[in-house]
Image (cartoon, rainbow, N blue to C red):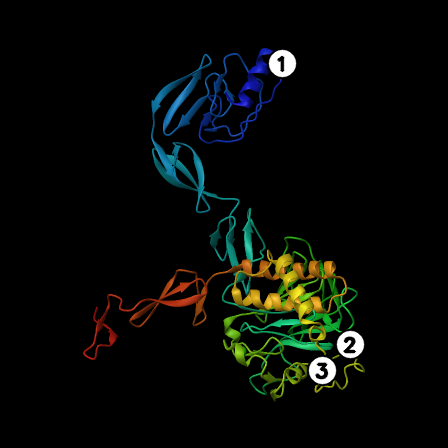
Amino acid sequence: MTLLAAIFVVMLSCDIVNGIDLFLASDEPFFFRNPDSEIPHVRHSRRAIDATDCFIPTTLWFIAEGTEIFTQCESFVCHNSKIVSKGRQTCCELDGIKIIDRQRRFIDCKENICVEGEWVESNENDPECCSFEDTPYKNGDTLAVGCGATECAEGRWIPSLYTQGYCRCGRVYMDPHMQTFDGDYFSWQLRCNHTIVQTVSLEDGSTHEPKTAVYSHFVDCGAIFREGPACVATSVFRDTPNSIFVFHKGVDNRVWHNGEEVNLEPSVMMKVAGSLVWMVPGGVRVQGTSSILVEYHARGSPSVSVWVPPALRGRVEGLLGNFDDIPDNDIQRGRHGPANSLPFFAGSWMAKEQPDPEECKNPDLTQADENLCEMISMKERRRLRDLCKVRLAEYFSDNPGTRRSQLESCIQDMCACRDEAECLEVIADEISNQRKQEDFALPGCVFNGEFFESNKTRDAGCEVYRCAGREWILAEKQPQRCCLSNTGRTRKNLSW
Ligand SMILES: [Ca+2]
């Protein structure tokens, strides 16, 4: 006898059962039928225990005289505190569980009733499902919104942390480090307002007045770092020339759109001038009409993450590089053409508009920034390396390349650090934010603008490609309808 059953017995023997409320909280593995009710089973019931009740040891429930219970298509009835079999009856199956006649279940967003062992669809919709363009989505399903996603939660679309795996993410973070769209990493001490990404105009190439751009203003990192490094502060997302969003450090529940304050609520996607805006832990996301998704992480040391869809391949540039699948050329092209050094590359992306025009008037691009890590001894560098490794091990990425760059970034940040404990906390927060973004990237592949879920295949003549996570891999060389030509090459057999 379990402890709970023992407690019941003690209660009965003490004659204190009157008024005890029973709570029948589950309908598995038994179903209850109330003989006085049209409702085929009682899911929740509250009443006092009676002497004629039957006790079911497996569930610790008492059921009333006349109550029917069912398990695995056999029905029973409670009679004089004993459970008596009434024989087998027809039942339906759902997810490997037998469900008896007259029971109702939601299957694929529609209510189904078990009628003589067969599911029959009724007109009732599952209230936990959502619909989009007449297609039903189950509770927990996600739907792509640009590079972001929305999730069906109990009948209502709410913002999701997921991003589409086929979109590329670039980010600028800490003091500052850049991760380009093609996966290159670099660090450079920036001041002033810079273009981190902008669309390339097809007419006149790179311009200071692009249709779409994201700008970040880099200022002193604050007390935790020694003087020198600059960190992301206020950032601007110019979705279109007429729709401009501004994000501020420390503010994770508001954005400013065309100068107007927009207050956000958790779990609500707001539509602002055609764009969607919502809160994420520690920050704000905007899915622009431009198809670019921006996340401003406002807490700790702010960071900006930008997702661009495959349609923008070859059509964006800026501090986060050109998106062309080649990491090596990411910091070679400045705004006005090839840049032969990192200072010229970074300097060329200084924006035209500056909050403090005097300070940023004539930046000296030739002056290399002093690297604080070069000013410390090898021994000290090794100590910082070990500190980063040990203290941040749980936050680092599983991807070896990303892990290496995270470790290198951490060492550099620690070289500039004033308060080691505080710095480690800020770095851990930043890395865990990156980790969250990685973990919430949905797998999938794109071909010719069409999206394919992971494991889906596509035909390419005589070859079949399969989407493995986020990459296309050759799955099959010669599908049945292809045959070998005389030259030994496969060709499509159109007559089949
Ligand atoms: Ca590139």
The residue wearing badge 1 is 16
Residue under label 2, please give it. Answer: 355
Q: Residue at x 71, y 82 (%)?
A: 352
Label 3 crowd (10 A; few <14 / some 14-19 / many >=20): few
Q: Position of residue 235 (x, y in %)?
A: 70, 70
Q: Is mark 1 within 8 Å of ligand 1?
A: no
Q: Please state which amino acid type lies under the numbered disc 2.
A: Pro
Which structural element holds mark 2?
Answer: loop
Disc 1/disc 2 C-alpha distance (Å):
76 Å
Specify the label residue 196 is tagged with: none
**The C terminus is located in which quarter?**
bottom left
- Mark 2 close to ligand 1, CB under 8 Å: no
Instruction: Give x and y (percent) for residue 117.
Output: 34, 34
> Amino acid under label 3?
Lys
Asked if the residue under mark 1 is in contact with the one under mark 3, i.e. CB atoms within 8 Å, the reply is no
Q: Quadrant of residue 290?
A: bottom right
The answer to the question of whether label 3 and label 2 lie on touching residues, with beta carbons closer than 8 A, is no
Q: Please, what secondary structure does the residue beneath circle 1 have?
A: loop
Question: For the point 55% across and 26% down, which residue is it?
Answer: 45
* Residue 304 seen anywhere in this rendered image of the structure: no
Q: CA distance from mark 3 to mark 1?
A: 81 Å
Give the residue at mark 3.
352
Residue 441, relative to residue 94: is it above or below?
A: below
Residue 495 placement: quadrant: bottom left
- Residue 269: where, in percent of width, then height? 62, 57
Please tell me how crowded label 2 is: few (under 14), some (14-19), or many (20+) other residues with Cα within 10 Å.
few
